[in-house]
Amino acid sequence: MARLDALEPMFRAKFLSAQFFILLAGSALSAADAETLDDFRAAAEKANAVLTIPDWEQTPEAIDASMKAAIARANQALDKIGSQDSGSLTFKSTVVALDDLTYQAGLVANRITLIKEASPDAAMRAAAEKAIKAFEDWAVSIDYREDVYKAVKAFADRHPRLEGEDEKLLKETLRDYRRAGLSLPVDKRKEVEQLRKELSRLGTDFDTNIANTQVPVVFTKADLDGLPESFLSAPGVKTGEDSYTVMANITWQYNTVQENAKKEATRKKLYLARKTLAKDANVPVLNQMLSLRNKIALRLGYKSWDDYQTEVKMAGTGARAQKYINDLIAGIDPKFQSELAELQKLKAADTNDPHARIMAWDWRYYSNQRDKQKYAVDKEALRVYFPFQNVLQGMFNIYQRIFDLKFEKLDAPYKWTNDLQLYVVTDSSSGEPLGMFYLDMFPREGKFNHFAQFEIIGGKLLPDGKYQRPTVALLCNFPPPTADKPSLLSHQEVETLFHEFGHALHSIVTRARYGRFAGTHVPGDFVEAPSQMLQNWVWDKKVLDTFAADYRDPSKKIPAEIIKRMKDAKLASAGVLYRRQFAFASLDLALHDEHPENAPYDCVAISNPILEKVFLPIDPGTTFVSYFGHLNGYDAGYYGYAWADAIAADLATVFENARDGYLDKQAGMKLRREIYQPGDSRDINVSIEKFLGRPQSIQPFLKKIGVTQQTKKDAPGRG
Ligand SMILES: [Zn+2]
C-alpha cells in the first residue's frame, strides 16, 4: 500500500548513476515559441486533461504546513474508507479511493523531495528532509490500518467482476496487504510488524557503519610506482617526506591505485584493507538482518526472502532469478576465460612467472595495461564533440522525431535557480499537451550530486474524470561552461543524458489510469531497461553525426575509427566486468535463499566461495559483504541490473532491424505505444512481447557482450 513513490527515484539514483561533478554556471536555450502556458492549458482542456505547474513551497514553514496538511487529508480519506458500512462498498470507494489518497499525498512528498534535492537554501533543504521523514513514517503506518484493510477485503470477498487495469489494481492492493502481514492472525501480524521495525533499524546501522568507515593505508613513493604524478600530489595523499596516505574507503583512490600500481604487494595491501571495511561492525549486523528477513519471509508463507522480494518483480520467484544468473554465468564463461587468458599472459610476462594467476587484486591493473596498449582512446579529447547545447538539442531532435513529440520552452513562473528551464511536451500530430519537464543541469552547492529523473506530478485519471498530465524534473551535474569554453560533455555524460531523459519520456507520455501504474512505476527489474536501451544511441555513428561536432569547427565529426576503438575497448572487458556483476548477483541471491529458521547465518562463509567461483581468487580473510551497501535496499534484487540489461538488448533489436535504425519513427512509436504508455497497467511481459512482436530472447544480450558461439541448446533462457 505504502507506495513510497517520492523516495524511489533517489533510491535508484543512489546506486544507478554514480558519476561525478564539477562546479557551477548557467546556460539558456533560445526561446522556441511564443505560446504561453494558458494556450497549452486550453489545449489540454480540449483533450479532457490537466497540465499543472507545481505550486512550490517557498519557506520552511510552508513545507512543514504542506506535509502536515497532506497527511491529515490522507488520514481523513483513510477514515472515510474504513468507516463505510459494508453495504455501500464499491470498487471506487475502496481500492480506487486508496490509489487516490496515496497519489495525492505522494504529490506533496514528490514536490518536497525535489526541494530537498534542489533548493539552493540550506534551511529549505533541512525542512524538506524533516518533512520527508515524517511522510515515510506515516506511509509505513498505512499498511497497518486495519479498518481500511477490512473494507478492501470485504469488497474483494464479493468477487466483483473486474477487468484489465481494474482487476490488476485490486489484485495488487490485496497482495500488498498480504505482504505486510495483514492476512495473518493478529499475534503473527504483530510479530511481522515488529520484525520489520527491527530490520529497518539494523538496515540503518548497516548503512551508517559503511558511511563511517575510514581506513588509511600508508605507502612509500616506491610502493606507488606506476601512479600518475597528479595522484601523488592530490590533496591529502602526500602526508610526509616519503609517505603517501591512500584511503581504502575512497573509491576513486582505491581504483586509481588498483589500476596503476606496478607492485602486486601494493595492490594486495590496499585490496585487503578495502575488502575488510566495516568487517567487525557489519558482519554480525548482516547476519542478524539475514535472519530477520528469513523469519519475515517464513511468517508470510514464503520459502525464502528471495521469493518474497522477487514476487513483485518480473522474475517472480527466487529460483527464476537464480537460474537466470546461473545461465548467464555459464553463457559468458568462454568469453570470460579468454579475457582472463589475455590478462594472465600480461602478468606472466610482467612477473617472469609463466604460472602467475590473475587474482582479485590484479584484474584492474592488467585490464588497464591492455587498454592502453591496444585501444588508446583519449576520453578527455572527445569532449570537444559534445558541447552541452548541441547535445541537448540533438537529443531533443531525435526523441521528437522517433516518438512524434514536440518540446516547447516556457518561462517557468517560479525558478529555484536562474538557469532552470521548463518545457511542455505535446503530441506532434494531435497537438495534445502530454506533460512538462524541468531541466536543472549544472551543479551548485547543496544540490543532489548525481544524475536522475524525478517525478513531481505523476499521471493519473482524477476522480472528476480529467487526466492529470505529468510534470517531471531532470537533475544533472554536467560540467559548467568556463570563461573560454562552453560546457563540454564526456561521451559517458552524453550517454547518461540519453538515459535519464528516457525516464522522463516514460513518465510523461503515460496513459495508465491509476497512479500506481503510471509512467516509471513498473517492476524494479524492468524500469531501467528502456533507458539502458537508449544508451545504444550514442554508440551509433549515424546518430552521433546528427549532433556531435567539434565546437571549434563544426565540419569535424567524430572519426569512425575512434568510435570503433571505443566499442572494441568496451567489448574487450565485457567478460570480466559482467562476471563480476554476476558474482554479486549470485551471492546476493544465495544469502537470501532458503535457510532453516533457527540456524545461525554466516554471511562470509556463504558469499566468499561464490566470489571465488564466479569471479577471481580472493584472500580468505576478506569480507566483501560487510561493505556491500546494496545488501540493504537492493537485497535479493542485485540480479535486476543484468536482468534489465538483457531486456534492453532485446528491445534494441526492434530499432536495429528497422529501416532507419535508431532513428526509426515506426519503432519509436511502437515503444511509446506498447512500453511507455501502458506503464504497469498491464503485465510488463505482455508489453515487451507486443513491442518485440515475438517472445523474449536472451540472445541479443549474449551477442552484445561478445558471446557468439552460443548454440540453441545451451542458450540461457528466461527459465
Ligand atoms: Zn536510470
Image: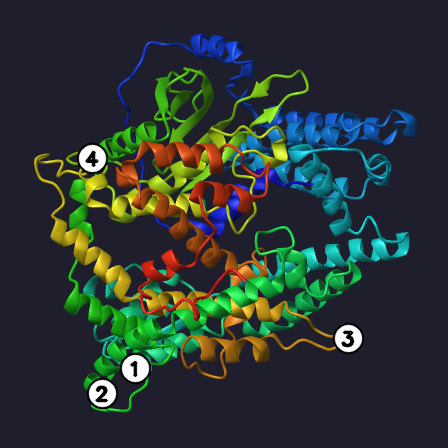
Q: Identify the residue position indicated by label 2 in the image.
A: 351
Residue visible at 43% across and 22% down in the picture: 415
Q: Are marks 3 and 1 in contact (CB under 8 Å)?
A: no
On the rendered structure, is 337 left or right of 79?
left
- Upstream in sequence: badge 4 or badge 2: 2
- In terms of depth relative to the viewer, which is nearer, 631 or 83? 83
Quadrant containing ligand 1 reads top left
Q: Looking at the image, is mark 4 or mark 1 nearer the viewer? A: 4
Which quadrant would the C terminus be assigned to in this image? bottom right
Relative image position of residue 5 (x, y in whole percent): 60, 38
Relative image position of residue 583 (x, y in whole percent): 47, 70
- In terms of depth relative to the viewer, which is nearer, 288 or 636? 636
Q: Identify the residue position indicated by label 1 in the image.
A: 264
Relative image position of residue 500 (x, y in whole percent): 40, 40
**SS assignment at label 3:** loop
Residue visible at 56% across and 27% down in the picture: 459
Residue 90 numbered tag: none
**SS assignment at label 1:** helix
Q: Are marks 1 and 2 in contact (CB under 8 Å)?
A: yes
Residue 547 numbered tag: 4
Q: Amino acid at mark 3?
A: Asn
Q: Identify the residue position indicated by label 3 in the image.
A: 598
Residue visible at 53% across and 10% down in the picture: 45
Say how the picture is coloured. rainbow
